[in-house]
Amino acid sequence: MLRFPRALWIALALALLLPLPSLFAQLYTDDQMMVLRLEGTMPSPVPGPFHLYTFANGSAEQRAQLFGGGTFPWWTLPELRLSFFRPLSSGLLALDHALAGRDPLLYHVHSMAWYAAAVLAAALLFRRLLPERTAAAAALMFAISPAHWMAAGWPSSRHVAIVGALGFSAIALHLRARERGDRRAAVGALACAAIALLAGEAALGVLAYVFAYELVGRDEPLARRARAFAPWVALALVYAITYKALHFGAYGSGGYLDPIAEASTFLPALPVRLAVFAEAALLGVPSEVSAIDPRAARVLATLGVLALLAFSLLLRRALRRIAPEHARTLRWLLVGAALALLPGAAGIPGDRVLFLPNLGIVAALATVLLHAGRAPDERALAAAPARAGVVLFGLLHVVLAAPVFLFGVLHLTLTSRTALDVLARAEIPRREGMRVLGIGLSDPLVGMYLGSGLQIAFDPPPATVDLLSMAGHDHRVRRVDARTLDITVEGRLLDGAFESVVRARRHPLRAGDVVPLGAWSVRVLADDAGQPTRFAVTFDRDLEDPSLAFLHWKDGGLRALPLPPVGGEVLVRHEPGPMGM
């Protein structure tokens, strides 16, 4: 198995087989929003097929269009910007829609093809860089890495696989250009990297690897290495200027940070985020856990530091037993992996961020598994700790990796189908012009994506969908008068990761703040350190109006919430949703 071309064919087979259940998945979360925006049934801050990853652009025009129409919840920061420069990935999703409409099969086949292409490019690069057995082991481990299932099975996350396929090719071409003096390869490397940058910000990791190669991987005068890297610096500058000139980036979000404009927030958060990613890369507990439950971040970060320390000791042991050229290659790959992780650390923690860094991480893992065990002349007792470490990492990255990858794809498939089934059976009157309002919907499949899901699954779709709360707490709903509700959260708003995506806690909402939303308005009545704990909602019509439908999650479904009479109160208890959140 650890020989080429056999390992290459096995890696490709795994890259196609493991995501196979996604062929039965429905449109999922962001997929739904993008399809609806292409159809014109959901407003878009920037129309057109190349801006599907612009969710909010911070303009004055978007406020009335998006916030008053139910696309974003009432607590959204008006200046929110979530705009990502991915015209190639966006255009390919638009192509899927032009060919298949709302049928998700083609979207998933297309995503699987890009994942297979990325695995192929990574395997060929490993073969070029590493001894055969190590390269084969790295190729197989890359194909089954649990961090990759989203890139393979979720169309909205396909941009990561596109970046990988193009980016790994760019690195290989740069190596060819430098080792053989091939000018056409040098031009091809820059071209591949430029196209990868059109697919997603993760392509900055390609520049990280090239920089690491020139800094650590070459043994020649510094001036010569600087000249070789100069065109890449020019590419990075053009990209950065374009990115800022077109107002891409993030502002005001609790999940996404601008490393430059919000450096005072990004830099203090960076060590914990990097340690969480180290834990996900080495021990396999998904980094998404730290986003779902912020209290888990420090636990995962501590585990990440410990895992990194143990792995470093094993790697040091392995480096003493391999050829100097192999050791040098690993050094620049690991420097590149560390640098490639920085752009992803500015976003919501998610294992798909590890796709580019895994080029170096998996190469080091393969080396450890093959070379850090017991030496022939070493006593068993002395080698016991190292062998235990090798067994642990082998268990996580060889034995359990493929099942965990498959579990992720199956989970996406099942929850995507369950969510649309639940939404299709929501207790909403089936008539035109309904206005739906959700209370306490903390699970993103029926909370953050309630509007897009109902547009896809419910017939006839509601006229508008708004969220009064996504807090994962009980709520007390009191009827103040015919048109006003007083809602008390048995906790706080903006505690959850998905609530704070549209408004970071560093942008407080204080008691007395009023949020006008066209036909209705919200007044914050009480807060805890800028996080609302009680608010009043006033509508433009009687709450008994037949055009209004209030929903909450109960007994595994979206149930109608019977409103109390004036002066009365009802308790809305929190229950986990389709994703268990």
Image (cartoon, helix red, strand yellow):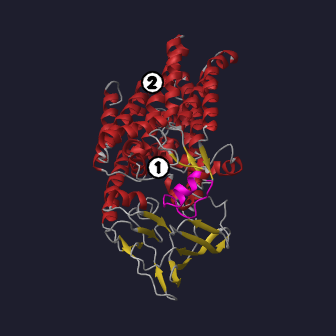
Please provide the residue range marked out in magenta.
Answer: 61-79
Q: Is residue 226 above or below residue 447?
A: above
Q: Position of residue 286 (x, y in %)?
A: 47, 52
Q: Position of residue 251 (x, y in %)?
A: 63, 50
| Residue 47 forms part of the magenta stretch | no
The extreme right residue here reads 264
Q: Position of residue 357 (x, y in %)?
A: 52, 37
Q: Is residue 63 above or below residue 158?
A: below
**Residue of label 2:** 131
Q: Which quarter of the image is occupied by the N terminus?
A: top left
Kind of residue sitting beneath label 2: Pro
205 sits left or right of 395 in the view? right
Q: Is residue 216 above or below residue 475?
A: above
Q: Which mark is residue 453?
A: none
- How crowded pointer 2 is (Cα within 10 Å; few <14, some 14-19, many 20+) is rated as some
Label 2: element kind: loop
Decide which of tag 2 and tag 1 comes sooner along the chain.
Answer: 2
Camera-side mark, 2 or 1: 1
Image quarter for residue 96? top left
Magenta stretch: dominant secondary structure: loop
The answer to whether any part of residue 394 appears in the image is no
Q: Which mark is residue 284?
A: 1
